[in-house]
């Protein structure tokens, strides 16, 4: 019974319950990777302000709001110039995603 419980715990840990935003450079341990989201680039807007929003988790529990809307509100931004993402992940056990918005 103990072996079965240990196997179940390993399966849950290895399943990657803490899912972070995909990056261009995926690895089992992602310590500090930043990626752009080019779908939001608007050259008519100046990147004068910066707003961030983070969601993080451990094992199968995740909390936070890393939405674009939350990052805009946190930075007082109404017009978006571009968006970046910062990702941390350790074997799907501990992870976080931060949305970084630049704009006016």
Image (cartoon, rainbow, N blue to C red):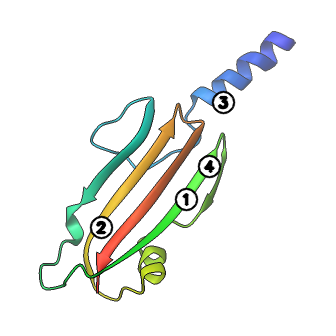
Q: Residue at the spot x=54%, y=44% of the render?
A: 95
Label 2 crowding class (10 Å Cα cut-off): few <14, some 14-19, many 20+? many
Q: Looking at the figure, which quarter contains the N terminus? A: top right
Q: Quadrant of residue 82?
A: bottom left
Q: Is residue 45 above or below residue 10?
A: below
Label disc, if present, on residue 12 of the rendered structure? 3
Q: Secondary structure at mark 1?
A: strand
Q: Is residue 62 above or below residue 51?
A: above
From mark 2 to mark 3, how far is it between C-alphas?
A: 32 Å
Q: Residue at the spot x=47%, y=48% of the render?
A: 20
Q: Residue at the spot x=26%, y=82% of the render?
A: 48
Q: Secondary structure at mark 4?
A: strand
In the image: residue 103, left or right of residue 53: left
From mark 4 to mark 1, how far is it between C-alphas?
A: 7 Å
Q: Are marks 4 and 1 in contact (CB under 8 Å)?
A: yes
Residue 56 percent across, percent down from the top left: 58, 53
Q: Are marks 2 and 1 in contact (CB under 8 Å)?
A: no
Q: Are marks 3 and 4 in contact (CB under 8 Å)?
A: no
The residue under label 1 is 55
The residue under label 4 is 57
Residue 63 percent across, percent down from the top left: 64, 59
Marks 3 and 1, the one that precedes in the sequence:
3
From mark 2 to mark 1, how far is it between C-alphas?
A: 16 Å
In the image: residue 34, left or right of residue 20: left
Label 1 crowding class (10 Å Cα cut-off): few <14, some 14-19, many 20+? some
Circle 3 or circle 1, nearest the eye: 1
The residue under label 2 is 83
In the image: residue 104, left or right of residue 2: left
Marks 2 and 3, the one that precedes in the sequence:
3
Marks 2 and 1, the one that precedes in the sequence:
1
Q: Looking at the figure, which quarter contains the C terminus? A: bottom left
């Amino acid at each position: 019974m103990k072996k079965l419980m240990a196997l179940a715990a390993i399966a849950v840990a290895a399943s990657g319950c803490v899912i972070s935003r995909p990056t261009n450079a995926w690895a089992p341990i992602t310590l500090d990777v930043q990626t752009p989201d080019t779908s939001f680039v608007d050259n008519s807007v100046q990147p004068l302000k910066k707003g961030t929003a983070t969601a993080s988790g451990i094992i199968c529990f995740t909390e936070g709001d890393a939405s674009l809307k939350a990052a805009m509100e946190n930075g007082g931004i109404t017009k978006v110039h571009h968006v970046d993402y910062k990702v941390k992940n350790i074997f799907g056990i501990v992870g976080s995603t931060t949305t970084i918005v630049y704009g006016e």
